Amino acid sequence: MTAFLGASPVSNYQIVSCFSVSAAVDPSVMPRVMAVFAQLGFVPDKWYSTIDGLDGDKLIIDIQMGGLNGSQAEHLAQSIRQIVQVDTVLTSEKRPLATLAHD
């Protein structure tokens, strides 16, 4: 997928920001989460969602976006956390092996 404003599709040589969102199962949650990215001109590289929980009462969305810097990723996470039915947003980074060897 294509992204704008400095982010680029995932490659083997860049840091990938990962977001794991846990929310109530509601049809408005996914478009609201996507709107956070769209408002900044971003299209996530990967998006996977599933319904989980003991009673099927949790929506889990896993999102990956390459080419973001740390402040952009943190801004996205904070914005997603402000969505009414979002419970938690966990973030992490995937780094290429070459980057890990130099840290």
Image (cartoon, rainbow, N blue to C red):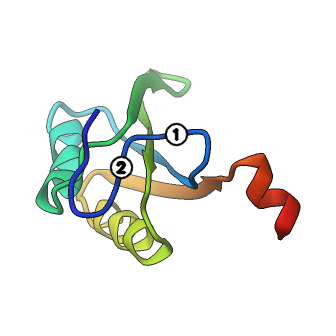
Occupied quadrant, residue 40 = bottom left
Q: Answer whether residue 26 is visible to the viewer in this image.
A: yes
Q: Is residue 55 above or below residue 11?
A: above
Q: Residue at x 24, y 59 (%)?
A: 83
Residue matched to label 1: 11
Q: Residue at x 25, y 39 (%)?
A: 2
Counting from the top left corner in percent of width and height, residue 18 is at 52, 49
Q: Is residue 21 above or below residue 92?
A: above
Q: Residue at x 23, y 37 (%)?
A: 30
The amino acid marked with disc number 1 is Ser
Q: Secondary structure at mark 2?
A: loop
Image mark for residue 32: none
The amino acid marked with disc number 2 is Ser
Image mark for residue 8: 2
Along the horizontal axis of the image, is 64 left or right of 99? left
Counting from the top left corner in percent of width and height, residue 74 is at 44, 72
Along the horizontal axis of the image, is 30 left or right of 72? left
Q: Nearer the viewer, residue 56 or 69?
A: 69
Q: Answer whether residue 57 is visible to the viewer in this image.
A: no
